[in-house]
Amino acid sequence: MSGVTPGAADAARPAEQLPPISTPLAGEEIPPPPRSNVVLKEMLRGSAVTTFLAIVLAMIVGGVLIAITNEDVQAAAGYFFSRPGDTFAAVWNAVYSGYEALFRGAVFNPRGADFAAQIRPLTNSLGFAAPLIAAGLGVALAFRVGLFNIGARGQMLIGAMFAGLFAFNLDLPMWIHLPLTLMAGILGGALWGGIVGLLKAKTGAHEVILTIMLNYVAFYLLLWMLRSPGLLQMPGTNQPQTKPTPASAQFPDLLGPLFPALDWGFVVVVLATLLVWWLIERSSLGLRLRAVGENPHAARAAGINVERLYVYAMLFAGGLAGLAAMNQIQGNVTTGFGATIDAGIGFDAITVALLGRSRAWGTFAAGILFGALKAGSFSMQAQGIPVDIVLVVQSLIVLFIAAPPLLRAVFFLPKTDLEKAAKARAKAAKKAVAA
């Protein structure tokens, strides 16, 4: 044996005694990514043109709904065949008035008495957008890792609960109290999201089921604490509500008292957007996260600890949802909060992330758009237009984003390579069955 080289010894060893080789180079193919990852990637890889057309188409449908529900249009439609011009004029006036009110309430109000009153709608839109952006970033980050985070609502509620339990009772100067309350909320949301990541990593449980169920757990846990004296309930009352947010824990106004809706929480959200962009697009951790989102099997074959990254991703996502909750309780809400402090933001964040294509700055822009829709809906309601129409527009945007073939069929856009390949495979399979 002393004259035999190690390579020759391995070659002389019987084949059944050789260690098994399981690499792509040895002929074993890496399994394809899970179907959920494929669907998610197809939804998020649309172009800016399709996103813009989705918004336009949703606004067109919203205009149709505005016209249908308008009383003048209904009255003019009664004699359409004798004077059709009246009906078209009524439709135009209804749609124009509705969207003009939306613009006036969300961007710029030319009827304002002074410049501050004229630009106040824009600051209101930014104020409404801040928690939407933060929660949307959490959902978008999870999407990039191939995880459907439906639990932003529960993560927001637990973040608010942590802030109320550990920070509301402190008497500290603002430069300590404010960041401490902020960190408590972020920590609470991160821990609640981390539970989902840990359970998925250790047991393989699906994150959609976990997050939906934990939403209910968070809601009823917070509600119990709000109804229990000595925990979160405001002293001297039996209402399920906390005491007011301490003044030293509130975000100061960003542009002064004339614009109360916009505070320094928006600046924190901008910094969070920058951090998420750097984390996903520029850091080595982000590279591994994106690799897991593309194909966890290939990432595992490359030596990436997929399970650990699932936990990291949900920790980050939950922390961003906790930041959204802090924008709620440290900003405009000063009379205490209840179990509905999330105000639907946790589910709207899914819409924002989809519209932003799960990119940090895309989510930022989508959050501003939805904040503007929310701010402008109040002006539309003052015009007699149902506020639910704005919700319909938001839902239709998601529908068209999630169904690119429908959008391309409406606007006669060419099919993508993926759709052509899918059609070719379906035709080949049909021929094979017929043969």
Image (cartoon, helix red, strand yellow):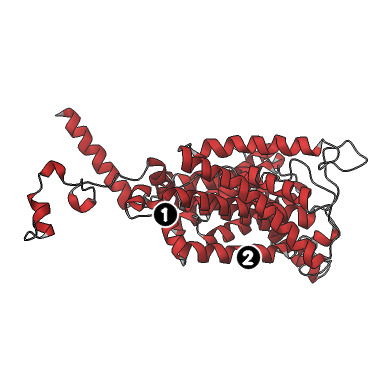
Direction from residue 407 to residue 162 in the image, left or right: right
Q: Could you say which is closer to the camera, residue 358 or residue 279? A: 279
Q: Quadrant of the N terminus?
A: bottom left
- The residue sitting at the right extreme is 236
What residue type is disc 1 on?
Arg
Q: Position of residue 264 (x, y in %)?
A: 73, 65
Q: CA distance from mark 2 to mark 1?
A: 24 Å
Q: Is residue 388 above or below residue 295?
A: above
Q: Quadrant of the C terminus?
A: top left
The residue that appears at 77% across and 62% down in the rendered structure is 178
Q: At 24% from the left edge and 41% from the top edge, which residue is drawn?
A: 425
Q: Is residue 388 left or right of residue 228?
A: left
What residue does disc 2 label? Answer: 270
Residue 364, given in percent of the width and then of the height, sits at 58, 60
Nearer-the-camera pick, 152 or 235:
235
Judged from this view, the residue extending furthest toward the top is 434
Closer to the camera in the image, 12 or 222: 12
Residue at left offset 77%, top offset 56%? 330
Q: From the viewer's perspective, is 377 left or right of 47?
A: right
Residue type, numbered disc 2: Val
At which x and y percent is residue 262?
75, 63
Residue 316 tag number:
none
Would you name the residue on which mark 1 appears?
Answer: 45
* Pointer 1 local density, CA inside 10 Å: few below 14, some 14–19, many at least 20: few
Please report the residue visible at 36 percent of the width from the left and 53 percent of the height from the top: 299
Q: Is residue 261 above or below residue 72?
A: below
Q: Earlier in the sequence, mark 2 or mark 1?
A: 1
